[in-house]
Image (cartoon, rainbow, N blue to C red):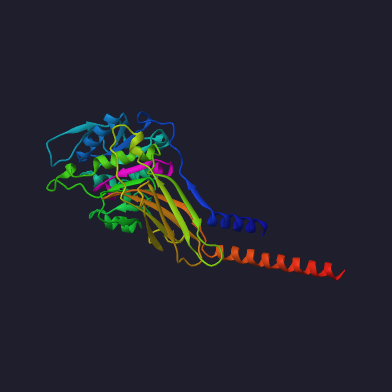
Amino acid sequence: MKLKTLLLVTMIAFSCFGVFSLPTATAQSMNDVHVLFVLSDGFGWSYFTAQDYFDNWGVQTTSVTRGSTLTVAACHNRPYRSTTADFLLSDFDLNTLTDYDCVFIPAGGNWPNLRSSQMVRDLISTAHANGLVIATFCIGNTVVAGANNIVTGVKVASFSMSNDEMAVARANIVEAVRIVCDNRIITGSEGGGIAGGGYTTAPIYEACAMVVKMILQQSFVQSVQVTPTTTFQGTGYSIAVETIDPASNLPGINSTTISTVTAQVYSPSNRITPITSLTLSDSDTDGIYTGTLTGLTAGPYFIDIEVHDSDHVLEVIRNTSSIFPALPIIIGGVIAVVGIIAVIGVLFYRKQKSAF
């Protein structure tokens, strides 16, 4: 019983004075970041473009292929081009995943071969469980969708050929954006195919930049503060989100203009559909977005903060605060009762004293 009481007091404290601070950047630099590409015959030319970005930034890269030889042929719809992988998947030790920071699945015609492989699914899910970033876009989304349900409850970019698999895996599909970053999973919305521009229209740069930002913990959010606006009657909570452009600390990566910051409120039992959503405002353009959350019944609830630019979900900061809207009323009632008892006690004491 004492433990339950302690937990309740702790929950009340967090509901009234919720302050969430993001972890500071680690000591890593771009030269310390290590990306593992997963390939198979027919991989898209997006791999070569991503490789060029990472090389220019000083990021280390390694590749593993699901094939019988280290020579891997690229997309069959384009002039012949190949790469030499560093490892065969059959020889790759999953215990060495801790040497990497990201698993990257390029788009392309290799997706059926990758999606059908239990070894690939295990590699991706094991990597994510070990804290690695998972990145892909276009048809590569289907490979991640099948990776042992790591996308359950995660926001992902909509892509027509992966949405069915994402829905089965209970992902939260976001329409009309190029990139979504949530829970260390980066997904992109398009590639275009051979007739639609292919890798030239894919969000390759955005995916690579987000990989580096996420690994180096260069968040778009410096801090989140959630405080109650009332004590006795209301269930309002004031939310303040301080933002920053992480590109200032990452040479070679372009700056991003934040367009929207929202607070998404979820119940613990449903991380797919928010109870309510609040768009925060920055009227004085100081990078601090604020708003007031009202009208919630008894909780508990979790607040996620989402940062958007014009066509990307740049970041989802999960569980910034746990709130219990009914509790401020309870606290206020307790304070009121204690106050009334104290007043009665003082009056009684004075009356007794005057009688003598």
Residue 227 % position (x, y)? 50, 55
Residue 349 % position (x, y)? 79, 66
Looking at the image, residue 301 sits to the left or right of residue 337; the answer is left
Residues in magenta, as a range: 126-143
Which quarter of the picture shows residue 132? top left
Q: Residue at x 11, y 48 (%)?
A: 195
Location of the N terminus by quadrant is bottom right
Which quarter of the picture shows residue 303? bottom left
Is there any visible trace of residue 274 in the rendered image? Answer: no
**Viewer-closest of 307 and 241:** 241
Which quarter of the picture shows residue 201? top left
Residue 283 % position (x, y)? 35, 52
Q: Is residue 48 magenta?
A: no
Q: Residue at x 61, y 57 (%)?
A: 9
Q: How many marks?
A: 0
Residue reaching furthest to the front? 354
Looking at the image, residue 287 sits to the left or right of residue 113; the answer is right
Q: Is residue 287 above or below residue 237?
A: above
**Viewer-closest of 296 and 54:** 296
Location of the C terminus by quadrant is bottom right
Is there any visible trace of residue 265 in the rendered image? Answer: yes
Q: Residue at x 18, y 42 (%)?
A: 199
Looking at the image, residue 55 sits to the left or right of residue 243; the answer is left
Residue 110 % position (x, y)? 23, 43
**Viewer-closest of 29 and 339:** 339
